[in-house]
Structure formats: structure tokens, C-alpha cells
Amino acid sequence: MATPSNGYSLDYNASKIGKLFHASKAFVRGVMGPVGSGKSVMCCMEIFNKAITATPCKDGIRRSRWLIVRNTTPQLETTTIKTWLAWFPEHVFGKMNLKPPINHKISFNDVELEVIFLALDRPEDVKKLLSLECTGIWFNEAREILKEIIDAGTMRVGRYPSKKDKPDDVPAEQFPSWYGVIMDTNPPDDTHWWYKCAEEDEWTRNEFGVLVPKEQFPENMRWEFWKQPSGLSPEAENIENLPRGYYERIASGKDKEWINVYVHGHYGFIQDGQPVYVHEWNDNLHVKENIPLNPYLPVYIGLDFGLTPCAVFGQRDKRLSWNVLKELITDDMSVRQFAKLLKATILEFCPKNDVYIFGDPSGAFRKDSDADTSFQILRSEGLIARPAPTNNIVPRLESVREPLKRLVDGKPAFNLDKSCNVLRKGFNGGYKYKIVSYSGEARLAMEPDKNQYSHPHDALQYMMMGGGEYKVVRGQNSKPLRTYTMKNNWKVF
């Protein structure tokens, strides 16, 4: 690689996966592997390589601007920036500007590279991401970043340098020479968006909107993913840069799931931050297998809307005991599509029960592209729902905590069917308070993190409040809120 003419040399030898990663021209590229496998360095080198091989502007300068994104300020400062400066030290490549937004401007020979570092733990930081124009973005530890942020980032790349800087003799499609998104991560669990994109999506749409196999899609429009081998395998990567016996030592004293994720680099669930129901939830106590639907009790349904609408089905008896029976999870679905799916699910799952539906109160105001609110769309499908009593997070959480703590005749007053996999993972740590930075100090966030587990848990809270727990929390009687009831002879067609 070309470097400043002061004798400094980048001593980097790409691994097997690294060579494939660097050779790819895919629009979005992701690499997943065990801790210590060199993923972050791989991405740092990719940024530098793209900078020195960029098509020159009309004045002969190879310009590029990159964003490096991490989910919190402490992690950005203690890991991401330290890795960057270890390879591109200030005494060689110039001083880093530590005033927000933190940036490092590198200029040598015919190269001008600007790197901007962003954390996403404040709303203003997300707004910056959605307003900056850049060549590429590196999402560091992508499992901690929402898919909606990744998708929004793909709209900000390819915007720098400007087309007005293109030399006359360079075709438009070759300027900039490449742009896109790169990502690295330790393994998430198998309900994460990364797993879906990397392991499940076999088809994608071409420029005409037609579904085609991934391998037939143009390379510069693909999303491509690589998995590094286990740290204990003969093919383990970056071993030469780690202490001898590194993986054997870090595996000592750890549980099987931790080793599976951080040593072997396999998909798995690791708890971080603080679970929302850390003091109330007991997986052995609250999870039951094959809880039957009671044909004589009404079914309560809680709904969360947005880009990932979901529903939770439950029943409550007169002794205030709850059985949470079913979850309906979607991804990237309109409310109109979801309403049809929900209607079909009700007819299949509980066709003879009375049904009470409660949803996110904001659904009464936010309108879709057809200028209808979520509740109006539900009504158009014959689904009569009403807003939950409040969107205040405190009574919402207490409406779940109270039955989690209750015992009725020595048995738990909250039972979750084992089939509710996403809700269960949320209870076991996926639904959490994440660690954020307040005035430079790491603390737990004031509200639960918005992630793939928060949506069904929001729906659960709306269901519990509508089913009477809101009144329990407020010290009133426990009767369900007055609502429209769908009798067992209701017609939706």
C-alpha cells in the first residue's frame, strides 16, 4: 500500500477471509468472527485501501470521506478510535480533531482522506449520520446497531466526492470508483437482522424489481457476508498477533454459550447491558410448554406498529393469572399487510374466542402513505382495536412486572408459552437497558433499548395494560378496560 514518504510502512498481511473481503466490490460487505480475529483492522485497512485507489478528481487529488460508526461513545473512544490510531498514528498521519464530531484528516501524496467518528447514543448523532455525505461507512460491531440505521446509512454513501469533481474523461459509473458500506461484528443470535441477511435471504430484487438469486445480482449492488473460522480451529485468523494460547485462556471459566460466540464465532445469545425484568423474570418458573388455549376465555392481543409490526396473544383468568400464548413477529412489513396477516392468524388461532385488541397509542395519530392511521387500517380489515391507556414507559413496565411477581395458589401468575421465542429471549436479556454515555460517564439508559426484542415486548405491555394490569398498577379494580369485543360470531370478510 502507498504510505507517506517518510519511511512509515503499514505492516499488514490480510488473512484468507480478509483477502476475499478486500477483493469484493459488493455494495454492502459484512464480516463476522470470534473476538480477536482481526475484523476491525480488516475494516481499517479497507478504508485506507479504498482511499489510495480512488479515482482522482479533476485536479488529480484522490478524495474520500468515511464515517466510522459505533453504538456508544465509550466504545467508540476506547476501542474503535484506539484501533484506528494504532494503525494510523497522529505523528505520521496528522493530529486527530477530538472536538465533536471527532475526525481525522489524512493528506499525503495525491490522497485526501477524511474520517469522521460517530456514536449513536444521542438523537443528534443519528441526525448527523442521516445528513452527512460520504464515500463509505464502516459500522463497527454492527450487531449493536439497528437495521434501520444500516439501511439509512446506505443512502448517505456515494455522495462524496461530488460529480462536479469528476474528470471529463472518466465515465460517470466510475466516479467515485467505489462506494458502499462495510461492517464487522461478533456473532449475534439467530433472530438478529444480520442472521436474516447473511443466512436466510437467498433472493434479492434487481433494478426492475424482479426477484433474482443473489449470485445473479450485479456485484456492486449485492450484500455479501463472510464468517471467520473458530479461534480454536487450525484455520484461525490473526493468531500471530495474539498472545500464545489466547483462545484457550479466555475460554477458561466461561459458559458454553459465551465460548460458542466469542471463541468459535457462532451465532448465539449473550446478555449485555441490564435486562429490563432482571429482578422479576425466572426462565425456569415462567416458561411453560404447550399452554392450551382456553375456548371459554377471551383472547387479548397487544399490537406494536412501525416498520416491524408485531402482535402478542394472551389470556387472563378471574384470578389475575396470565397465559401468554403466541407471538406474531414481522420484519419490514406495512401496517396494511400486517392487518391482513393478523386477521388470518386470529381466524386460525382463536376463531371461537371473544377478542380484545389494544395497540400502541401513537397508532391513532401516525398515518401511512394512504393517509390512514394504523387503527383505521385495522378497522378496514374488520379488526376493531383501541389504543392502550398510555405510552408512558413506567406504567407499561409495571403492568408486566406486577404479574411476574404474583403467585396464585403457589403458582406463577404469568406463564409464557415456550413457542414465544423472541419474547423469551427478550426476557432473558435481549430486552435491556443498554450502556450509554452521559457527560462522559457510562451509565444505563433511562429507557429500554430499541431493538428486535423491544417491539414484541411493547406489544406485550399494551396487551397487559388493556387486560386489566394498568388498573392494578394504579390501585384500581382489575377489570379490563372498556372496549369493543369481537364475539365468536364476528365476521371479517
Image (tube, grey):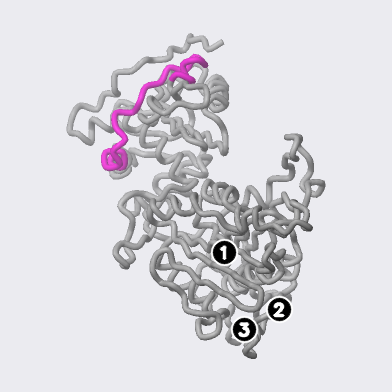
Is residue 117 at least partly visible in the picture? yes
Residue linked to disc 1: 186
Residue 38's x, y, as percent?
A: 62, 74
Say which of 63 and 283 sits in front. 63
Q: Quadrant of the N terminus?
A: bottom right
Foreground tag (2 vs 3): 2
Of labels 2 and 1, earlier in sequence is 2
- C-beta proximity under 8 Å, tags 2 and 1: no
Say which of 248 and 220 sits in front. 220
Q: Is residue 147 left or right of residue 4?
A: left
Foreground tag (2 vs 1): 2
Of labels 1 and 3, earlier in sequence is 1
Residue at point 43%, 72% (across, down): 97
| Picture layout, residue 438 above or below residue 93 | above
- C-beta proximity under 8 Å, tags 2 and 3: no
Residue at point 49%, 30% (across, down): 292
Count of numbered marks: 3
The image quadrant that residue 465 belongs to is top left
Q: CA distance from mark 2 to mark 3?
A: 20 Å
Residue at point 57%, 39% (across, down): 331
- Identified by mark 3, the residue type is Asn
Residue at point 28%, 41% (across, down): 398
| Picture layout, residue 197 above or below residue 177 | above
Q: Which mark, residue 1?
A: 2
